[in-house]
Image (cartoon, rainbow, N blue to C red):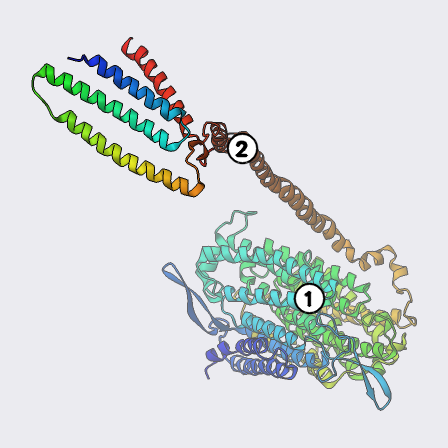
Amino acid sequence: MIPISWYLIFSAALFCIGLYGVLSRKNSVAILMGVELMLNSASINLLAFWHYYSQIRQAPQMDSQVFVIVVFAVAAAETAVGLALIISAYRKRQSVVANDLSELKG
Amino acid sequence: MSTEILLWIIPLPPLLAFALIVLLANRRNGLSTGLAVGGAALSWLVSLVVFFRVIGVEGLSTNPIGQAVKWIPTGDTWLKIGVQMDPLSAVTLFFVAWTILMIFVYSIGYHNFGQPKGDHDVPGLPPHGAIVKGAHGKQTVMSIEPMYARFFALISLFAFAMYLLVVSDNLLTLFVGWEIMGLCSYLLIGFWYAKESARNAAVKAFLTTRVGDMFLMLGLAALYSITGTLSYQEIFGNETVMHMLATSASPVFGLSWAGFIGLLIFLGVVGKSAQFPLHVWLPDAMEGPTPVSAMIHAATMVSAGVYLAIRSFPLVAAGWQPGLPLTLPMNVMAAVGAFTALFAATIALAQNDIKRVLAYSTISQLGYMIAALGTGAYVAAVFHLVTHAFFKALLFLGSGSVIHGMEHGVLHTGEHIDPQNMYNMGGLRKKMPRTFWTFLIGGFALSGFPLVTAGFWSKDEILSGVFTGGHLLVFGVLALSALLTAFYTMRQITLTFLGKARTTAAEHAHETPLTMTGPLMVLAVFATAAGWVGIPKTFPLLGGLLPNWFEEFVGSMVHTGEPAVASHSLIPLATSLVVALGGLLLGWQVYRRVDKADAADPMAEPLGPAFVVFKNKYGIDKLYQFILIRPARWLAETFTYKWIDKGLLDGILHGIARLGLLLGSLLRRGFDQPVISGAGDGIGRGTRELGANMRGIQSGRVQQYMIVAITVLVLVGLAFYYLVFKA
């Protein structure tokens, strides 16, 4: 059986990759992809702990899976909205570079 | 109609005339004349009807005809006012009615009714004359008074007040009439208000009489608070009230209340009748038009003062019987009266203004009456009051006529002389015969020319009354002033009418119209005939030919009875003959040779410094100016205005204001600006600076935000971990 720490390390690695992607990429779509990675790493954490918890209690429980599914749904919706925004911004200024979208600069 | 109703009616027509002129006819001279003279005539008619009705009534003095109505509720009693006719008011009413009517008629001519409007005349100044083109080319003639209707309105109001005073049955309405007359006097003296001298004279008259009026009011207040009434009958006609007043002691000088109140009322009389020392206003009052001088300042208003003195005689004489020594108030009256008589006569000697001579003569004659009253010669005082009113009104109107004639001459010749100065006249006898003869009659009556004139009989009665009473000092003073009176009267007549004209204006003087000379003639009749009703029974030869109606009629007023004139001593008679004739003869002798307008007065040399003193009126005016007016002005202008008002009061106010300003600016600088305003500004500025400082963070780069957020998160997380969980 794979110990839980592997899951957690994997999840942390995934989160760091996502975070790196979010912070370092210029393309908004790539940033959005990084965000998705980070979300999924969180979901992996949830699933890992659910599995671990179920084995200790010897009684399967559905709560975390439902939770993860909701997170997927929300992530899908969020991605849809994010992409729509990016497309809309692209139409306005022919660019998807995040640093160009600095209208709110103080 | 019953006499009571007629009495109520007497004062009303002039009041109505006044109201109508003021409200409706103030621009219409003809209508004003009609209203005023009509009103006066109606009052005159009713007065005469009343007079002739009441003189036949038996016991009129104890049971006067009259009627009273309730006027003001005073607690549980009523203040009553009403009308009353007793012998004293009857004879007063008689001369008042005649003189008022005559003076009204005279005023028509005096104010040049029917003449054209003046070219340069302005309201507030006497008319200057108008240029008309006639058969003889251009000519300057008299012009109509610019404020003609106003004059008639005012004298109508005055006539109302005088009638009110006479028919009144109590001291309250008497006082009301008295004060209205004071007002009219003020308004009429200042009638030509554009002249400063007239304004000053008006104020002077008003203020001086006010001094007396204040005492009079105190007297009335005291009388009312003691007796609870002001009605003549309920005080003077009531033995118990009089006895109570005479025996209860007042807090002043150990006088009885009667004497004290009598003295206070007498002080009112001193003001109104221009007795020393409140005489100063009357000569200046001559600034007014001459009919005013005649009516208010000779015949009626100043006589009203004596009338009140006679009315209140029972108070003054309370506890006195003929033969007994005089009471203190009587002594005061006798002394003031006699002194005033002599004092004013001496001043009259040295005056050159024709009206001023008469003014001082009026003061002197009023002093005569007061002196007579003070020595108990009650009837004589009343008698002289009546005759004096007639002949003095006559003289004043005569002098007005002379001035008018002279003004005509002045306008004609264009000479710049004072038409009132007697030295500029002379020889007017031939130019103005009617004025001359009537003036002569008036002057002789004033001097006491024997037998034919009214003045002789009344003056003789005063002298004999004073002599029989045994007051030889008063007698001597009065005799001396009678001599002076005759002297200055003849001086006046000689300078004005006799000899030759001393100026060209006097040569061109002209007789005045009939509206002016007519009243003169009527009054001249009274100036002679009014004396015949009072010829003493004991008079040598003539006594008893005519009944001494006056003494019987008026004498019944005095419940104490007249001094018993057992034998009519010949000394006063001889004295009055000598002084009258001697004074007249002297006056003529001394002044008939004056032939130049600028000649020195022939009396100036023999009298020496005394003449200068007379001429300067003993310096009384200057003295008052110095001791009263100047301090009063100083008090008003310097002390009250400059020091108290400007300095102290304004200082306090300004101080408070300055303190407020100071406090305000302190608060503003010390609290409002730094604290309140600073806080507001600080908040605003702080916010702005905060915003300015923070804007750098707001780079608009999403990833940077993210880095910051994560950094902070990590740091907070670490801090949290170490500080909270590990601690």
Q: Residues within 10 Å of mark 2 (few under 14, many from 20)?
A: some
User: How far across and down, in percent of the image, does residue B542 sit?
Assistant: 69, 79
Residue B554's label in the rendered image is none
In the image, what residue type sits under mark 2? Gln
Where on the picture, by quarter, is residue B340? bottom right
Residue bearing mark 2: B673
Where on the picture, by quarter, is residue B565? bottom right
User: How far across and down, in percent of the image, does residue B279 sit?
Assistant: 69, 59
Q: Which residue occupies the foreground of this view, B125 or B583? A: B125
* Element marked by disc 2: helix
Q: CA distance from mark 1 to mark 2?
A: 63 Å
Q: Residues within 10 Å of mark 1 (few under 14, many from 20)?
A: many
Q: Which residue occupies the foreground of this view, B667 or B76? A: B667
Work out whether residue B107 can be spotted.
Answer: yes
User: How far across and down, in percent of the image, does residue A80 sit?
Assistant: 29, 37
In the image, what residue type sits under mark 1? Gly
The numbered mark, 1 or 2, whose residue comes first in the sequence reads 1
User: How far across and down, in percent of the image, does residue B377 sit?
Assistant: 62, 65
Residue pushed farthest front? A1
